[in-house]
Amino acid sequence: MSKTILFASDSDFEKEFSRCCNQYSKLSMYIAWIGNPKAVIPFEYLYNLSEISAIVGVSFCQTHPDGIQLLMTLSHDLKIAKEDVLYHPKIYIFSDQKKKAVFIGSSNFTYHGFYENHEANILIEGLSSEKVFTDIESDVQKWKSSKYSFKSDAEWLKEYTERYRRRR
């Protein structure tokens, strides 16, 4: 049976996220924004995982281009959410052969989302076969389709980086 924990403390959320990066082998992220990897947290945790996939939002040019570049290097499947629909989830799904851990909440994949903002997140952890996990996986599948996201490349990242810098 799965367990559910609410994190209203950023340090508790960060510790549990770090634990999951060490305990599980795979991470699928569905996130509105990612920060600058030079801030270290939470990017340092990704190096413990053997497989990463992500769909990242770039609305309002809030996602740091260097974060996208790093995910292009680390991820086997990185997609960018199309900007014609505001993409705003913060869902992190960890998995291994028998278990899953899912964080759903308000923390973007940024230093502030993990360490300084006042965020709230829920962790659900248990056996992969439990209905709650199959339901979550089913719900996020739509974002992987070409209707909602696309595979980024160097050309797209160059154009986005220019837009990001102009906005700053």
Image (cartoon, helix red, strand yellow):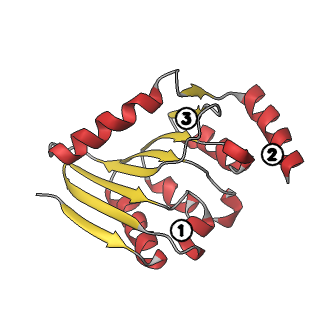
Crowding near the residue tagged with mark 3, few <14, some 14–19, many ≥20 C-alpha atoms within 10 Å:
many
Circle 2 — which element? helix
Is residue 125 left or right of 13 when viewed as pictured? Answer: left
Is residue 24 left or right of 18 when viewed as pictured? Answer: left
Question: Which residue sits furthest front?
Answer: 85
Circle 1 — which element? helix
Q: CA distance from mark 2 to mark 1?
A: 22 Å
Q: Earlier in the sequence, mark 2 or mark 1?
A: 1
Crowding near the residue tagged with mark 1, few <14, some 14–19, many ≥20 C-alpha atoms within 10 Å:
many
Q: Which mark is residue 78?
A: 3
> Residue 119, position in %: x, y?
49, 70
The residue under the point 24% across, 58% down is 125
Depth order, front residue of 133/68: 133
Q: Is residue 20 among what the camera can see?
A: yes
> Residue 123, position in %: x, y?
31, 62
Q: Which residue is mark 1?
A: 114
Give the quarter of the figure containing the N terminus. bottom left
Q: CA distance from mark 2 to mark 3?
A: 19 Å
Q: Which residue is mark 2?
A: 164
> Residue 121, position in %: x, y?
40, 65
Tag 2: amino acid: Tyr
Give the quarter of the figure containing the C terminus. bottom right
The residue under the point 66% across, 56% down is 35
Tag 3: amino acid: Leu
Crowding near the residue tagged with mark 2, few <14, some 14–19, many ≥20 C-alpha atoms within 10 Å:
some
Q: Earlier in the sequence, mark 1 or mark 3?
A: 3
Q: Are marks 1 and 3 in contact (CB under 8 Å)?
A: no
Q: Is residue 128 among what the camera can see?
A: no
Q: CA distance from mark 1 to mark 3?
A: 21 Å
